[in-house]
Image (spheres, rainbow, N blue to C red):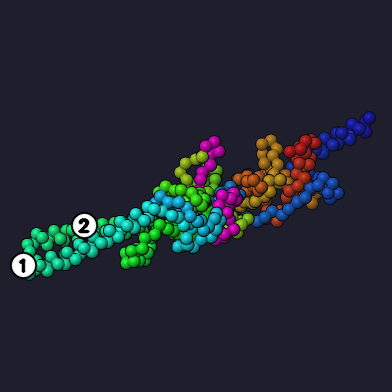
Amino acid sequence: MKAARHFLLFSLLAAQAALATDEVILNARQIESLGITTAKLASKQHGELSGMPAQVVIPSNQILTISTPLPAIVEQLEVGVGDNVRKGQVLARLQSPALVEAQRGLLQASTQAQLANDTLARDKQLWKEGIIAESRYLAAQSQYITATAALAERQQMLRLSGMSDAAISRLQSGKNLTSLLELASPIDGVVLEKTVSAGQRLDAAAPLFKVARLKPLSLEIQTPFAMSDDLKVGAAVTVPAYGAKGKLIAIGRSLSGANQTILLRALIQEGAENLRAGQYVEASIAIAKVASPQWDIPNSALSRVDGKALVFVETPKGFRAVNVNVLHEGAQNSAITGKLEDDDKIAVHGVSALKSSLIGTSAGD
């Protein structure tokens, strides 16, 4: 009985001593049996915020909507969602009676413009010879200006309908009307959306496709407001997991709801092909100044005791608890500062056993 009391007293004194020195004494066999594994601290550059949650988006000025300019029926669709397209490539063929009417209007306007031109040339000569009054010549000139303006209007209407200048010239010379309306891509890009099907009847201005350039891409980054003071437009931004790089182009001026984060926008120009629109990633941002070096560690290495964050650094006798400041806690990794060295090894698994030993209880995290 007396020996048991001495053993209990010894155990309590040992636990208190370990707590006082933040030291957990373990031998190699105990470390192995507790499933504790370590990893060397990954050296981290000064002045970088890492693990920032971000979403990949397409810059709005790189997305174009392709619509039908006239009422029509979809005859044939040439591309689908995800297809790469070239500038000028036909995306869809439509049948549009309204196109025939627009072409007829062009031919009428062309004929009127030609007649007005001939009349103007004749009256100009007659006026010079003194055969007609100047007022008649001026009236012919006015009619010519009106007719050419009407012709230009009709030509522009057909351009907006998707006809090229060459096709308009052929129409004026050959008088061959067609109801076929071809819609072409205005850019090199990728088809994001297709909202119609073959045989569908469409009103004017009905959208058919969304086409976008996928390089460069943007990142929308959510950053705690407290970390935004040292951020500058033009700072380097990386997505380490995908080898993507770019720069910060905008810092938001308002906070989002209860989480009090600020929205940053970055433009990714290198490695954009490794990302996908809508994808969630973790980004790193270079900052101007930082008070102390920072490290990225897995979240499994973090423990909290009495509201303080700490990690366990390997020592010759076991492990030493070191208080750290968590700058940012991401989904998998956290950015920390503290009295650590780049060559330190920290516990990354079995941390709950170390924490229990540190506080002298058997409770886990």
Tell me if residue 272 is in the magenta stretch.
Answer: yes
Q: Residue at x 66, y 47 (%)?
A: 332
Indicate whether 149 appears above or below 121.
above
Disc 1 residue type (three-letter): Gly
Residue 43 belongs to magenta span: no
Q: Secondary structure at mark 1?
A: loop
Q: Residues within 10 Å of mark 2 (few under 14, many from 20)?
A: some
Q: Residue 233: in sight, yes or no? A: no
Q: Is 115 left or right of 130, judged from the image as shown?
A: right
Residue identifier under label 1: 130
Which range is magenta? 257-283
Residue beneath label 2, please?
Answer: 146
Q: CA distance from mark 2 to mark 1?
A: 25 Å
At 75% from the left and 44% from the top, the residue drawn is: 351
- For image coordinates 55% across by 38% down, the residue present is 259
Q: Would you say residue 10 is visible in this rendering?
A: yes
215 or 19: nearer the eye? 215
Disc 2 or 1, which lies upstream in sequence?
1
Q: Is 303 located above or below residue 87 in the figure?
A: above
